[in-house]
Amino acid sequence: MGGGPAGLSAAYELARHGYTPIVLEADEVVGGLARTVSHNGFLFDIGGHRFFTKWQEAEELWKEILGPKLLRRPRLSRIYYRNRFFSYPLKPANALLGLGPIEAMRVVGSYLWWHYFPYRDEQTFEHWVTNRFGKRLYEVFFKTYTEKVWGIPCSEIRADWAAQRIRGLSLMRAVRAAVLPSKHGSIRTLVEEFWYPERGPGQMWETLADQLAGMGHRVLRGRRVSRILHDGGVVNQVVTEGPNGQESFAGAHFISSIPMRELVQALEPAPDSKVCQAAEGLRYRDFLLVALIVNRAEVCPDNWIYVHDPAVRVGRIQNFKNWSPAMVADPSKTCLGMEYFVFENDELWSAPDQELVAMARREAVHLKLAKPEEISEGTVVRMPKAYPVYDEHWQQHVNTIRSYIEKELPNLQLVGRNGMHRYNNQDHSMMTAIYAARNITGAKYDLWAVNSDPEYHEEQEYREEQKTLDPALQGRPPYAEPARVAKTAKSNSGL
């Protein structure tokens, strides 16, 4: 259930083991948030998807799918603050000169204070960042942007989110990385190169869907899961709504990457009220992208810009040409993605497209990225449930639902960002799904251990698990070629 990176990776792994998977995707395109959208030949990445991982299997799968169409790209991202651009990752000279001597002294003094007198009970995003950067730098470079993204105060965002998204980073480590860079990229947040599909992330997942279809496996689009039927502690059927009306799909094992709240709401019979209330308590942040076509070959050197300016509502800006030259239809033009973080059905979400394009145009001009006459056109893309919200009660709600699923419906596994209500990256979503597929073959992976350790210790755990739980893979490539899989796959229509 779900045709994003997780669902498609699970299907491919199952096919490799000789099973017959079916992928059910609610939308007409696969890839989920990692899709590529096209408008008049210009291609958009929804949210910015760097293909970077410390999981060798994930990287090998990317290369297997796209081959030479997977490009190695340099990373440049900056912070816009007080009409200035600051390098990110942090570069001390740039930051100190930009902030000025007085502000720089305040930042250093604040860091030293919080280094020796930190919050002892690290509960919130504010606590987590302050303990590592100091209160002043938190207020300058983290608070405004983060609250713009999530729509709630940093004091209400759990520290778990920061631990996942700003992995292994502190002020002193950032300074050290800037002065003595390591080619190995030991701090994940500071990676300066990444892989990227020539025509955006959707190219990866559309290609994989095509490969699955070529192997005889169904990837069905426009099928929204409306009911998940279970009996006697076993899920046995899902019902979808789509172009053919209601359709039923029976199976022996089920993997879900659809939003956890929707999954619980679709269960028949319904779980007890405690589980249903937990599902209702889960919150999501939704996403708007306004793509502007600028009649200028070069606008800025960045992949993306984080906007710390309360005068505008845009949170981040992508320059798609700098992700890949093939993202623009005309090299004499530039396409900017103005990203807005919203709640579904609030004023921005519900605004007409022409109003959103006009607002994005004004804000691009305000930020001095383009002149009004240079912006020729724009288009709007809306993505609901783009980000699971880590609010005060999210972990309790997830634990309640997870406990119910594992105890009552053991042939249903949850994977991916929305499936687990965890802020996973693409590689983590893929690995939870690959592990779920291997669990069906008899392995015993703990899917919730993926992306749970801020220091990325799951890599060593994975290598040990692979030796003990999947000995058949020893001495062979992680993935067989599609043609070989198709030839050797045995029939297993019960899945």
Image (cartoon, rainbow, N blue to C red):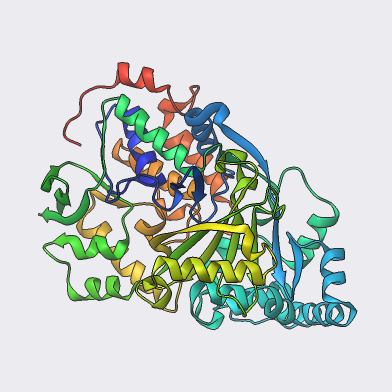
Query: Which residue occupies the foreground of this view, 191 or 17?
Result: 191
Residue plotted at (35% across, 67% down)? 398
Q: Position of residue 213 (x, y in %)?
A: 30, 29
Does 146 appear above or below 199?
Answer: below
Query: Which residue occupies the foreground of this view, 267 or 370?
Result: 370
Q: Residue furthest front?
A: 373
Does 289 appear above or below 461?
Answer: below
Query: Which residue occupies the foreground of this view, 41 or 320?
Result: 41
Query: Which residue occupies the foreground of this view, 162 or 89?
Result: 89
Residue plotted at (60% across, 71% down)? 363
Residue 452 at least partly seen: no
Q: Is residue 75 left or right of residue 208?
A: right
Q: Is residue 213 left or right of residue 118?
A: left
Quarter occupied by the C terminus: top left
Q: Position of residue 8 (x, y in %)?
A: 36, 40
Q: Position of residue 234 (x, y in %)?
A: 15, 51
Q: Is residue 303 left or right of residue 171?
A: left
Q: Quadrant of residue 118?
A: bottom right
Q: Quadrant of residue 221?
A: top left
Residue 329 at least partly seen: yes
Number of numbered discs visible in the structure rendering: 0
Q: Is residue 141 left or right of residue 10?
A: right
Q: Position of residue 119 (x, y in %)?
A: 65, 82
Q: Residue furthest right?
A: 101
